[in-house]
Amino acid sequence: MQLWASIVNAVTRRAEACGGVTGMKMIVGLGNPGAKYAGTRHNAGFDVVDGLAQQLGVEVKKKKFGGLFCQCSLDEKTLMLLKPQQYMNRSGQVVATARGFYKLGLEDVIVVTDDMALEPGRIRIRTKGSSGGHNGLGDIIASLGSNEFARVRVGIGQNTEQDAADYVLARPAVQERQLIAEAVEMAQQAVKCWVIEGAEAAMNKFNIRNE
């Protein structure tokens, strides 16, 4: 994994020296592929990206980099929406490959994922940080060789009486589903704010809402 991160970073640095895609932002939603996992707590990142795509009049269905992606625009900025299809804990290579291909800086990447540490209905935005025990984030950090990229965490809560893996891979009950849906919608707004106004503005607006 360290060797892969070194290779990706070297390729990206060389590409960046030649100039990247001006103004492009890459929005990555994490989840597990397949109908079996649709609607589960762990697929909140997919839900955010799919909702953004619908709002922007596109579909995330082209296959490349080991994921599904599409390009669209928002506020005269080019966006790449990406859903890795290698299962959650192997998302890193997909993200690193796409970033290298488009010659993007870390500041041009935002990852959306679920978070058991946040109650359903809440979100949290950060510009860097540890994985917090999230395997998908952890794999991306390892593959990029850095934790200095933005992320939006969508709260799914936790059940101390249930195995964590079983919990995140289950579909929420009706009342909880509504709260998570509200958080997904808020995360979509936060991502658009990040694109248009920047990370600081997004954190100031949306983290304060969730205090």
Image (spheres, rainbow, N blue to C red):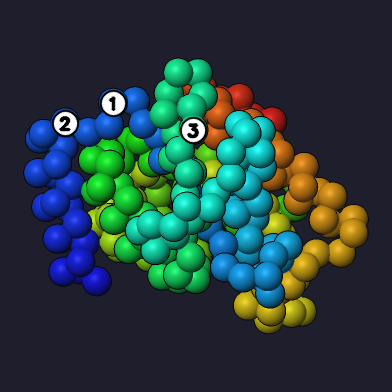
Can residue 184 be seen?
A: yes
Q: Amino acid at mark 2?
A: Gly
Residue bearing the label numbered 3: 72
User: Are dots 1 and 2 in contact, CB under 8 Å?
Assistant: yes
Q: Residue at x 53, y 39 (%)?
A: 125
Disc 1 residue type?
Answer: Thr
In the foreground, 14 or 140: 14
* Residue 98: image location, x then y, percent: 32, 51
* Residue hosting label 1: 22
Residue found at x 68% / y 74%: 36
Q: Which quadrant would residue 205 be assigned to in this image?
A: top right
Q: Is residue 136 left or right of residue 174?
A: left
Residue extending farthest to the right is 175
Q: Judging from the image, what secondary structure is the residue with disc 2 in? A: loop
Question: Residue 56's spot in the image, x, y percent?
Answer: 61, 31
User: How many residues crowd around disc 2 within 10 Å: few (fewer than 14), some, or many (20 or more)?
Assistant: few
Write down the residue under mark 2: 19
State which quarter of the image contains the C terminus: top right
* Between discs 3 and 1, the one toward the N terminus: 1
